[in-house]
Image (tube, rainbow, N blue to C red):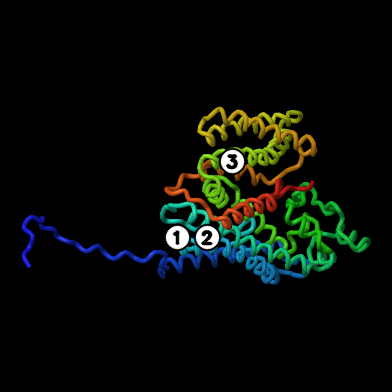
Amino acid sequence: MEENQNEPFRIRIPEPPQPPKNKITLKAGIKHTLLFVATFLCVTFVGIMWVGQTANAETYWEMWPQGALFAVLLLAFLGTHEFGHYFAAVYHKVKVTLPYFIPVPIGIGTLGAVIKIEERIRDTRKLFDIGISGPIAGFVVSLIILIYGFATLPGPEYIENFDGHDAIIAHIQDTGSFPDEPLDIPAPEEGGAVIVLGNTFLYSFLASFFDNVPPMYEMYHYPFLFAGWLGLFFTALNLTPIGQLDGGHILYSLIGYEKHKKVARIGFGGITALAGIEAIPFLYLNINEWFPGYGYASTILWALVLLLLMKKAFYSEHTWIAPVWLVSVAISVVYLLVSNGFEQAGSLIWVFWSFFLVYFVKLEHPPVLFEQELSPARKRLGWISMAVFILCISPTPIYFFN
């Protein structure tokens, strides 16, 4: 066969073979396993502080099975949540890392777990599936843990296993039930407050079907209830319909870029209203301690901080800043006035979350290349996930009873 003399001469260089997506290397497997083990140890150690039966043990080592049980339950939720994302990404052939578990030897022993999507998700169906798979999987696990905890609750006398509950134990022995409010409040020099976990619609609904449910100021001594409550709350945080959180992915896929932008900004106003309910009392108590009688300046101080935060969040768009800022501050102040909550110290979780959303997550979801109509089944599941967000969120996740 004669060669075509007019065809230019080309040198063909074979492309190097590309490694298959999501292949787990030995190095990656070791790294992620070590992070998981470190997180398990941290959660076990910190879990002893929460669920360790101190009245029956002379050393921490005697309580490690209780701490390990709490670690198993909490990491079962976190692992299921993150692997839900992971397997959805693998199914859609999107490059993704294994979950990174984050150990920290304080609080609950971990800052959670994350996966890293290593390529752009190009259409809303993939975005939706990857976004919703984690919260739904984690929610189911936390619900199972919580229901099992309610179904196997011991009697109120279980609290006798923990030191520092003399007044409550005496009340239980007299009445057979927990008191409505904490009785064993430490002296000011010892801390002077009892930790109280915030209730949620779903937790309260489930609790109504069972007997011997402990009050929220004692619930964290019960490993299944505490781990289940944390699972529901972290699910709600992830379902916040803002930015590139799971809820942001889901809502963006449901309603598109422009509508999501508006909803995210309004939702951020709601989050900052919850932040104000925590921040204003915190500032009030500290200002009153140093400058007695000037505590109410806390409202002005928080309003100024919030104004700067919203300027950053809304890119100096005053048509959004002014109304959202005004409504947020008004909701916080009215709530505190009605509830007499100016002197009720909180945890500042929503304050941290507000700054985290602005500086790390951003409010607006970046547009994807192809916005596709979701199937009816996906739409139903998406709106159910938004309902789960409402049912599992707590306006005051942690506060202190003095």
Q: Distance between the residues labelled 3 and 2?
A: 24 Å
Point out which mark residue 263 bears. Answer: 3
Q: Mark 1 points at which residue?
A: 96
Question: Is residue 213 shown left or right of residue 394?
Answer: right
Name which quarter of the figure residue 119 lies in. Answer: bottom left
Q: Name the residue under label 2.
A: 85
What percent of the width, then of the height, locates residue 332? 71, 36
Which amino acid, mark 2?
A: His
Question: What residue is at 43 percent from the left and 62 percent from the top?
Answer: 93
Q: How crowded is mark 1: few (under 14 residues within 10 Å), some or many (20 or more)?
A: many
**Sequence-earlier tag: 3 or 2:** 2
Disc 1 and disc 2 in contact, CB within 8 angstroms: yes
Q: In which quarter of the image is residue 324?
A: top right
The local secondary structure at tag 2 comes to helix
Of the 4 image quadrants, the one containing the N terminus is bottom left
Amino acid type at mark 1: Val
